[in-house]
Image (tube, rainbow, N blue to C red):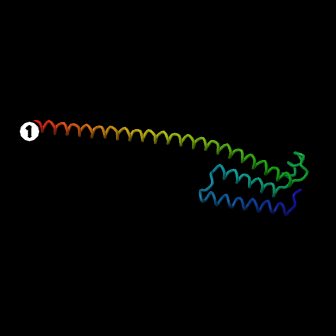
Protein backbone atom coordinates (compact mmCIF):
# COMPACT_ATOMS: atom_id res chain seq x y z
CA UNK A 1 0.00 0.00 0.00
CA UNK A 2 1.27 3.48 -0.92
CA UNK A 3 1.23 6.19 1.68
CA UNK A 4 -0.55 9.44 0.86
CA UNK A 5 2.76 11.31 1.03
CA UNK A 6 4.33 8.93 -1.51
CA UNK A 7 1.32 9.37 -3.80
CA UNK A 8 1.62 13.17 -3.59
CA UNK A 9 5.36 13.00 -4.30
CA UNK A 10 4.70 10.71 -7.26
CA UNK A 11 2.12 13.10 -8.74
CA UNK A 12 4.33 16.15 -8.09
CA UNK A 13 7.35 14.49 -9.74
CA UNK A 14 5.18 13.45 -12.67
CA UNK A 15 3.78 16.95 -13.14
CA UNK A 16 7.30 18.42 -12.89
CA UNK A 17 8.59 15.97 -15.48
CA UNK A 18 5.65 16.74 -17.75
CA UNK A 19 6.40 20.48 -17.46
CA UNK A 20 10.03 19.93 -18.42
CA UNK A 21 9.05 17.71 -21.36
CA UNK A 22 6.50 20.21 -22.65
CA UNK A 23 8.96 23.11 -22.39
CA UNK A 24 11.55 21.08 -24.32
CA UNK A 25 8.94 20.28 -26.97
CA UNK A 26 8.10 23.99 -27.32
CA UNK A 27 11.78 24.84 -27.76
CA UNK A 28 12.18 21.97 -30.27
CA UNK A 29 14.90 20.38 -28.15
CA UNK A 30 13.21 16.98 -27.80
CA UNK A 31 12.38 14.44 -30.50
CA UNK A 32 8.80 13.29 -30.89
CA UNK A 33 9.77 9.70 -29.98
CA UNK A 34 11.44 10.82 -26.77
CA UNK A 35 8.60 13.12 -25.80
CA UNK A 36 6.01 10.38 -26.33
CA UNK A 37 8.02 8.04 -24.11
CA UNK A 38 8.25 10.58 -21.28
CA UNK A 39 4.60 11.66 -21.56
CA UNK A 40 3.44 8.03 -21.40
CA UNK A 41 5.71 7.39 -18.42
CA UNK A 42 4.32 10.47 -16.62
CA UNK A 43 0.77 9.37 -17.40
CA UNK A 44 1.47 5.88 -16.07
CA UNK A 45 2.85 7.21 -12.78
CA UNK A 46 -0.11 9.55 -12.36
CA UNK A 47 -2.43 6.58 -12.86
CA UNK A 48 -0.40 4.63 -10.29
CA UNK A 49 -0.70 7.51 -7.81
CA UNK A 50 -4.42 8.16 -8.37
CA UNK A 51 -5.38 4.48 -8.44
CA UNK A 52 -3.07 2.79 -5.91
CA UNK A 53 -4.82 -0.53 -6.35
CA UNK A 54 -3.18 -0.90 -9.81
CA UNK A 55 0.43 -1.01 -8.56
CA UNK A 56 -0.67 -2.97 -5.48
CA UNK A 57 -2.19 -5.65 -7.69
CA UNK A 58 0.81 -5.72 -10.02
CA UNK A 59 3.19 -5.96 -7.06
CA UNK A 60 1.28 -8.86 -5.53
CA UNK A 61 1.13 -10.64 -8.90
CA UNK A 62 4.92 -10.37 -9.20
CA UNK A 63 5.48 -11.43 -5.60
CA UNK A 64 6.80 -8.07 -4.47
CA UNK A 65 5.69 -7.24 -0.92
CA UNK A 66 5.95 -3.46 -1.06
CA UNK A 67 4.25 -1.30 -3.67
CA UNK A 68 7.02 1.28 -3.38
CA UNK A 69 9.60 -1.42 -4.14
CA UNK A 70 7.53 -2.43 -7.16
CA UNK A 71 7.46 1.17 -8.41
CA UNK A 72 11.22 1.56 -7.99
CA UNK A 73 11.87 -1.79 -9.67
CA UNK A 74 9.46 -0.89 -12.46
CA UNK A 75 11.18 2.47 -12.98
CA UNK A 76 14.62 0.84 -13.05
CA UNK A 77 13.37 -1.69 -15.61
CA UNK A 78 11.85 1.04 -17.83
CA UNK A 79 15.01 3.13 -17.68
CA UNK A 80 17.23 0.14 -18.51
CA UNK A 81 15.04 -0.62 -21.53
CA UNK A 82 15.25 3.04 -22.56
CA UNK A 83 19.02 2.99 -22.15
CA UNK A 84 19.21 -0.10 -24.37
CA UNK A 85 17.10 1.51 -27.10
CA UNK A 86 19.22 4.68 -26.95
CA UNK A 87 22.40 2.59 -27.15
CA UNK A 88 21.07 0.98 -30.30
CA UNK A 89 20.19 4.39 -31.74
CA UNK A 90 23.66 5.73 -30.91
CA UNK A 91 25.31 2.73 -32.57
CA UNK A 92 23.25 3.29 -35.68
CA UNK A 93 24.14 6.99 -35.74
CA UNK A 94 27.85 6.19 -35.25
CA UNK A 95 27.70 3.88 -38.27
CA UNK A 96 26.04 6.61 -40.32
CA UNK A 97 28.61 9.18 -39.23
CA UNK A 98 31.48 6.82 -40.09
CA UNK A 99 29.97 6.17 -43.52
CA UNK A 100 29.47 9.89 -44.18
CA UNK A 101 33.02 10.73 -43.07
CA UNK A 102 34.40 8.09 -45.43
CA UNK A 103 32.25 9.37 -48.29
CA UNK A 104 33.36 12.96 -47.69
CA UNK A 105 37.00 11.87 -47.52
CA UNK A 106 36.67 10.06 -50.85
CA UNK A 107 35.01 13.10 -52.46
CA UNK A 108 37.74 15.39 -51.12
CA UNK A 109 40.40 13.05 -52.46
CA UNK A 110 38.76 12.92 -55.89
CA UNK A 111 38.43 16.70 -55.92
CA UNK A 112 42.08 17.19 -54.95
CA UNK A 113 43.20 14.73 -57.63
CA UNK A 114 41.06 16.56 -60.17
CA UNK A 115 42.55 19.92 -59.17
CA UNK A 116 46.08 18.49 -59.32
CA UNK A 117 45.53 16.94 -62.75
CA UNK A 118 44.14 20.23 -64.07
CA UNK A 119 47.07 22.10 -62.58
CA UNK A 120 49.54 19.66 -64.13
CA UNK A 121 47.85 19.82 -67.51
CA UNK A 122 47.71 23.63 -67.24
CA UNK A 123 51.43 23.75 -66.48
CA UNK A 124 52.14 21.46 -69.39
CA UNK A 125 50.18 23.75 -71.72
CA UNK A 126 52.04 26.80 -70.42
CA UNK A 127 55.37 25.04 -70.86
CA UNK A 128 54.40 23.92 -74.39
CA UNK A 129 53.39 27.45 -75.33
CA UNK A 130 56.66 28.78 -73.89
CA UNK A 131 58.61 26.23 -75.91
CA UNK A 132 56.70 27.23 -79.03
CA UNK A 133 57.40 30.90 -78.31
CA UNK A 134 61.08 30.19 -77.76
CA UNK A 135 61.35 28.07 -80.89
CA UNK A 136 59.55 30.76 -82.91
CA UNK A 137 61.86 33.39 -81.50
CA UNK A 138 64.90 31.31 -82.42
CA UNK A 139 63.58 30.59 -85.90
CA UNK A 140 62.66 34.23 -86.33
CA UNK A 141 66.16 35.33 -85.35
CA UNK A 142 67.73 32.93 -87.76
CA UNK A 143 65.68 34.35 -90.55
CA UNK A 144 66.90 37.88 -89.86
Please tell me which residue lies in front, 95 or 44. Answer: 95
Residue appearing at x 85%, y 63% in the figure: 5
**The image quarter in which residue 22 lies:** bottom right
- From the viewer's perspective, is 111 left or right of 82? left
Quarter containing the N terminus: bottom right
Please tell me which residue lies in front, 101 or 50. Answer: 101
Q: Position of residue 38 (x, y in %)?
A: 70, 53
- From the viewer's perspective, is 50 left or right of 128? right
Residue 25 to residue 118: above or below: below
Residue appearing at x 86%, y 62% in the figure: 4
Q: Position of residue 47 (x, y in %)?
A: 79, 55
Q: Position of residue 138 (x, y in %)?
A: 16, 37
Quarter containing the C terminus: top left
- From the viewer's perspective, is 63 left or right of 80? right
Residue that label 1 marks: 144
**The image quarter in which residue 90 lies:** top right
Residue 99 to residue 14: above or below: above
Q: Residues within 10 Å of mark 1 (few under 14, many from 20)?
A: few
Please tell me which residue lies in front, 143 or 61. Answer: 143
Q: Position of residue 35 (x, y in %)?
A: 66, 53
- From the viewer's perspective, is 46 left or right of 31? right
Secondary structure under the numbered disc 1 in the rendered image:
loop
Which residue is most to the left?
144
Amino acid sequence: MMTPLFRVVLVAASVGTLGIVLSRIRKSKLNIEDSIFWILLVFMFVVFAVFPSVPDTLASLLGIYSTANFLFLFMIFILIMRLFSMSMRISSLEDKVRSLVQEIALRDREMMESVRSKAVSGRAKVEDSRRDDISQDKSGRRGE
